Amino acid sequence: MKSWKNNIILVFFAVLLIGCFIPGRLFSTRFLDESIALLLFCVLVATYLKKYNGWRKFATCTSFLAVIAVFTFYFIQSAFWGSNTFPAVLYDALVEFKPFVGFFSVLLLAPHFTQKQRKFLKYLCIIPIAFGLIAAFGGQIWLLLEHPARFAFLFTVCALIFIWLSEINVQNIIIFFAILAVGFLSTRSKFYGFFAFSLFIWLYYLCKKDIQFKKTDIWLFVIALAGVIIVALPKFNMYFLDEQFLSVEYMDSRKVLFSTAFQIANDHFPLGSGFGSFGTDASTRILSPIYEQYGILAENGELPICTCDSLSAALLAQFGYLGVCLFLLFWGYILRKTYRLAVRNNNKKLFIIGISIVAFFIIETFSDSTFTQNRGLLVMMLLAFVILDFRHKSQDTRY
């Protein structure tokens, strides 16, 4: 059973990895991530039903139960208040819940890949890397990957998978940064910020004797954060302050999203407007009344902005200040868990990968809706694999 479980999770991850980079015009992967998240949860349920007292172990995963409770509360509130039609509320709730399902399902199933399976994953990365290089040097990034952000993500996730599956030595670290550096061709400022953070965190912890967090570390992380902000500042000015740029169609999307999100959060304090109401795919497929209430709709009744351009704006509007705090609390839980396991194992590599993934999502949250897409599910599964590697080394089964 354990071997079968490992194989099925490996297949899910491999299919999702390749599916993230298949152009939609060639082959539709629209519901691939939802299908994989559902199948993962089904495997989880089947596994625990077969185990004696299996659900008792499931109940010990208080963090997953807390996430389920929060989503249930917001779903009931949204359906009761009528933030949108019931299908829109349900669809948005499932999409938002998907990355958490993927993460906790993998964490609870606890696959332990063999060396052969780990090599398979490492060599599998050659396919998207080759695809990305062909797109870049052929001048076809928009045609083959549909957006430079997907190109940057391709090399980011492949670099992380490579270093996760490799021994730490000078050669592998150079290969990691060589793969990551190709992402510069995307010309995305968020990638520049992530690369700057990665460079800092690797240099700092490889030179540091241990992982123990000390007071002096606070100032160094403040400096790193300042560096990321400085790198991203030109794009901030462009998206929020440059009137000439903002006059171009759709270029004012983030400015409109954030300014409206704060209005909604203040008007619906502290819980927000609910699922399917603002800044999400569901809110546009079945048009939310919020857009008309806040004067965003054009005269022809269509939306003049790209609504899925920033997850943080959607979080603030739909779940209010309380929801933003809960989202940050989840990442605090991840950082705390990663740090404790890293100190116990004194494993710098896994610790660096863990906090790099958290940094990746924080950056992406402000500039895209990656977390709720197939790319988000892929990286959340990778994060679970990293945490499981910690646990396998320390024999720690706590959640």
Image (spheres, helix red, strand yellow):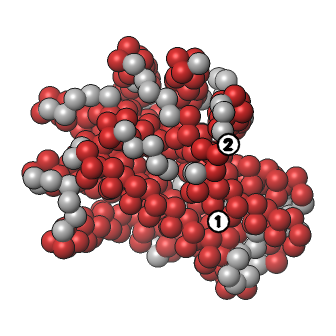
Label 2 sits on a secondary structure element that is helix
Q: Is residue 213 above or below residue 31?
A: below
- Let me know if residue 36 appears in the view: no
Q: Is residue 182 above or below residue 85?
A: above
Q: Is residue 220 left or right of residue 375?
A: left
Residue at the far front: name it: 52
Q: Is residue 113 above or below residue 79?
A: above
Q: Nearer the viewer, residue 149 or 126?
A: 126
Q: Residues within 10 Å of mark 2 (few under 14, many from 20)?
A: some
Residue type at numbered disc 2: Trp
Picture coordinates of residue 153, whole percent (x, y): 44, 41
Mark 2 vs 1: CB contact within 8 A = no
Residue under pointer 2: 55
Q: Is residue 347 left or right of residue 306?
A: left
Q: Nearer the viewer, residue 256 or 164?
A: 164
Residue type at numbered disc 1: Ala
Q: How far apart are labels 2 and 1 at the CA level? A: 34 Å
Identify the residue at image location x=66%, y=33%.
Answer: 52
Screen quadrant of the N terminus: top right
Label 1 sits on a secondary structure element that is helix
- Let me know if residue 327 appears in the view: yes
Q: Which badge, 2 or 1, comes first in the chain's sequence?
A: 2
Identify the residue at image location x=39%, y=19%.
Answer: 114
Of the residues tagged 2 and 1, which is closer to the observer?
2
Residue under pointer 1: 314
Picture coordinates of residue 207, whole percent (x, y): 9, 51
Picture coordinates of residue 73, whole percent (x, y): 76, 66
